[in-house]
Amino acid sequence: MLRLGITTLEQLSAKADRGPVRAAVSCQLYEEARGSDETPERRQKLQSEVLRRLRFPNGTYKRTHPSRFDQFDCQVVEASCELAGKGPLRLLDLGVSDATTSVDLWDRLEAKLARELQFVATDKYIEIEIRSHASGRLHFAFDSSGELIQVRHGRFVSNCYGPESWKRFPVNRWLLERKVPRLVTKYRSGEDGDFSSRRVRLIGHRALELERRSPGFQTGECDLFDLPEGPFEVVRAMNILNPGYFDENRLKTALNGIHRVLVPGGLLVVGANEEAGSKVEGGVYRRSASGFEFISQADGACRIHSLIMERATGVS
Ligand SMILES: C[S@@+](CC[C@H](N)C(=O)[O-])C[C@H]1O[C@@H](n2cnc3c(N)ncnc32)[C@H](O)[C@@H]1O
């Protein structure tokens, strides 16, 4: 009927030990886990549980895993090492979530590449803002464009996208649809006063450390439909150019943008899979003047292979 959310690290820790967490987890625990005295691996696990059920306004999730593409990463490293050129290899990684898989690829590339590496790990949703009422009972989490993504009121935590089902948890849905809009209206009117704000970067500890010690590695916000100028030798998009997330026209728009920012002969790396080490359906493609040429396949065919090859005939 009513499912309470997870609002303390102790609750999160206990639930995470019993399997995947199903209740909504307060976004505040992301920073609390970072500052806790758990081991780095345990902190990473708790942080990924915070992100696991959080859904964003465009319907995407931030699920990711360390060592997610081991074999395919080796393939990508090999293709990248074969690229001609003596200057830095500039790589744009799109939709990286907390950049765990970016660090995996960076480590492999760094070990093999005989040139400088400039790696930009990006995601549309890297920073959130949490606004907390002085009472400590009410908290709103917004994405960086100001969209409300989560509300916490006492022990009730509701994700605004991908909420609980009416059938299984009618009280949660009733609260989300009736009570939350009233809380938001009151908050926006300023009548409720006294809110403090803080920004939280949803970047894992390995990526933060790498960014601190290696000037060649950076993280930042970037929408795959609005890419930076570049150019880049390699653009990678793992578990984001999915037909389940975007329709065919949107996927074509994204491919056109990637084509625009790649150098001639540069690489497009695309793939999708489930847990760490699971079969990757993906491929490596080379940018040609009119589109893309197929270079190699991962364990299985890329789910948008035909769209990428269609781009090869100059479809815009
Ligand atoms: C399923 S995760 C994939 C994370 C990582 N690439 C991996 O494979 O483990 C998808 C990520 O894409 C991000 N995302 C969603 N829409 C995006 C967009 N329009 N541009 C860039 N990133 C986006 C989400 O925030 C999420 O972190």
Image (cartoon, rainbow, N blue to C red):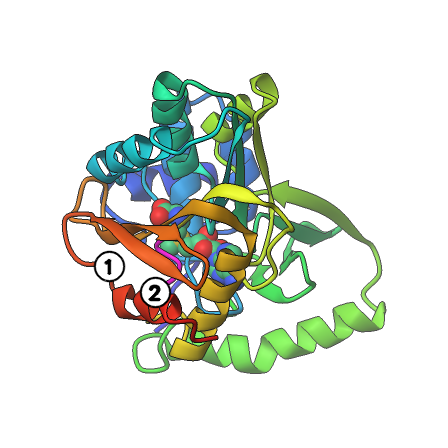
Residue 240 falls inside the magenta stretch: yes
User: Would residue 11 be visible to someone looking at this image?
Assistant: no
Q: Which amino acid type is shown beneath numbered disc 2? A: Ile
Where residue 294 appears, as percent x and y from the top left, is 27, 54
- Give the magenta part as a residue range: 238-242
Q: Which amino acid type is shown beneath numbered disc 1? A: Cys
Q: Few, some or many C-alpha atoms within 10 Å of disc 1 (few <14, some 14-19, many ≥20)?
A: many
Query: On the rendering, which quadrant does ligand 1 occupy?
Result: bottom left
In front here: 218 or 228? 228
Q: Residue at x 49, y 58 (%)?
A: 259
Residue 231 is left or right of residue 157, and the answer is right
Q: Residue at x 48, y 75 (%)?
A: 316
**Is there a contact, CB below 8 Å, between mark 2 and mark 1?**
yes
Task: Kindly identify which numbered label has been placed on residue 302.
Answer: 1
Secondary structure of residue under mark 1: loop
13 in relation to 147, above or below:
above
220 in relation to 271, above or below:
above
Which residue is tagged 2? 308
Q: Few, some or many C-alpha atoms within 10 Å of disc 2 (few <14, some 14-19, many ≥20)?
A: many
N-terminal label among 2 and 1? 1
Q: Give the position of the N terminus as an image quadrant.
A: bottom left
In front here: 257 or 145? 257
Where residue 28 appears, as percent x and y from the top left, is 57, 45
